[in-house]
Image (cartoon, rainbow, N blue to C red):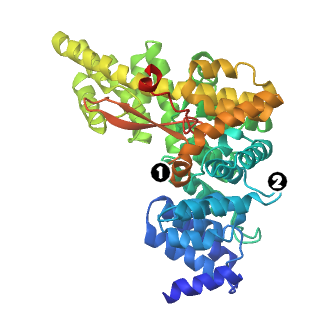
Amino acid sequence: MMKAALLSLLVAFGSSLPAEASEVFDLVQAGALSALAGQKKAALVSLERAALLSPETPGVQETLGCAALLLNDRALASRVLGRLEKLAVYHAMAVAEGPGGLSRARTSLVKAAKLPDRKVPPGALFLSALAFYEAGQKERADEMLQRAVRVSKSALDAAFAPDPAACVARSALSTPLPSETEGAELRRAKAAIDLAGALIESARRGEAARIAEGLLEQKAARAAALRILVLIENAALARRALGRVEKALQVEPKEEDLQVARALLLLRIGEEARAKRHLETLGTVEDSELSSELHRARAELALRGGDASVALELSELAVRADPKSDPAVATHVRALIANGRYERARSFAAALMKRKPRGLNPFALAAEIHAAEKATHKAEGDRLRARAFDLEQSKIEREVRRREEVIRAVRDAESGVGATGLEAIRGEHPALSLPVDLVIAKLGAAGSARAARDRVLQSCAPQFKHLIRRTKSWDMVEVEASLYGQTEKYEAPLSAADPGRCTPKRPDPKRLRR
């Protein structure tokens, strides 16, 4: 109790104890990493100490408040976030639980909405609009939504309750470290890479990719940043990363690690001819995971070219560099088959099957082995299972493509291409009408913009409570599939906020018949 009371006083009055900036920086980074890993005690010990030492240092209170929210310590989160107007949405999330919680959340959001447009968080305006609409104040709701789409860089991102995990990482990275501190740049870069890795572990790949993109100009962190960008699962994220890497190459065209990343990303998005052309000019890289990907890419190209012995040599190097890489093991299995080493291929394929990979088909590898050994009956059984796996995997891929199509259209419209064609997308994918309406509300003529705002409010206001309380990752879509014989929920990464959060209610067929 004494510790909590002291912390409250420090938060309330901004008292400051002398402290080394480097110590505060290290405490905040350690606390953020622990929070992302779900280690509540360790996270709060580090962050509370940082708050006691230097409460006015930028990033300290923000990281503490959002970490407490992420770790479900809503009392602490409410106490800290209540003073931070720019984090009003997170404060609303913190106070939304319990009797009267939704009313407290509305009050917090409406208070933040009174700030000038240049200071108000767009997300707070969006959620305030929903709060007013639910309260029957439709004119105030429309006014708030008009402001939200006007001031937000992306209506799509402003439309969703933010992710506390992303806030923890961003706030921790905003904690300053004086440039004269020994090894300051290296420590900042390492902290960013560590946080990006922790975000990947907590299924926040999009946020991790954005941190990595910001590190491409720092040579100390570049290899690790490129590794993150190369290993991301989503094709849309890979295209985005390729654009960032090519921009960096315009500045430093001879940097080999950037050249490696470009070739690997080209292969990831299916541009094999360009990838092959770049791979032929490259040497080796020191980073083990990047090196593994480079060897694997070359092994795949050697297999397609019929050079089995070279493929085997390269695939062995890939597995040795990164034994945990499922794609590297799969390529090695195919290389072993091509060289007639079936027993060893079976051994690697069995180890891969135990991992239950989602991104590649282990039954297809088993079928290849049995077919090579002339075990026709076993090969046919494996092919049937492989086809079933592919059908289920396609469910996940279709859902991701469906949502990414809308995300791309929204991004194009917001960047000045215009809203033409968005109505056609709504007609094809009515469940994804929210982002379409948000762009029309921002860019459309007065009448169509007003109609779009009405549709947004009608769709989202009934889900206001859900939006405030949501704590899952915002850049994932959940899809049910049966890859290994049992239906499970799989999370697939998107390149931006999930645009399926608010959907219009479908009419009740029974009422229509009446």
Please give the residue where the numbered disc 2 appears in the rendered image: 117
Mark 1, mark 2: which one is toward the viewer?
2
Total marks in image: 2
Dot 1 surroundings within 10 Å: few (below 14), some, or many (20 or more)?
A: some
Q: Percent x, y for residue 74? A: 51, 68
Amino acid of disc 1: Ser
- Residue 395: % across, % down: 42, 24
Give the number of the disc on residue 341. none
The quarter in which the C terminus is drawn is top left
Could you say where residue 28 lies in the image, as x and y percent from the top left? Answer: 60, 69
Q: Nearer the viewer, residue 496 or 276?
A: 496
Res 426 → quadrant:
top right
Work out whether residue 1 or residue 322 is closer to the camera in this orientation and state it: 1
Q: What residue is rendered at 58% in x and 87% in y? A: 6
Badge 2 amino acid: Asp
State the residue in front, 99 or 279: 99
Is residue 302 visible to us here? yes
Camera-side residue of 449 and 193: 449
Residue drawn at x 67%, y 39% as measured from the top left: 156
Question: Which type of secondary structure does the marked residue at label 1 adopt?
Answer: loop
In the displayed structure, does residue 82 sit left or right of residue 469? right
220 to 435, vertically: above or below: below
Figure check: 151 above or below 279? below
At a point 61% along the width and 66% down the height, the residue shown is 63
Q: Position of residue 360 (x, y in %)?
A: 39, 27
Residue 202: give its label: 1
Q: Compute the Cα span from label 1 to label 2.
A: 33 Å
Q: Is residue 353 above or below residue 70?
A: above
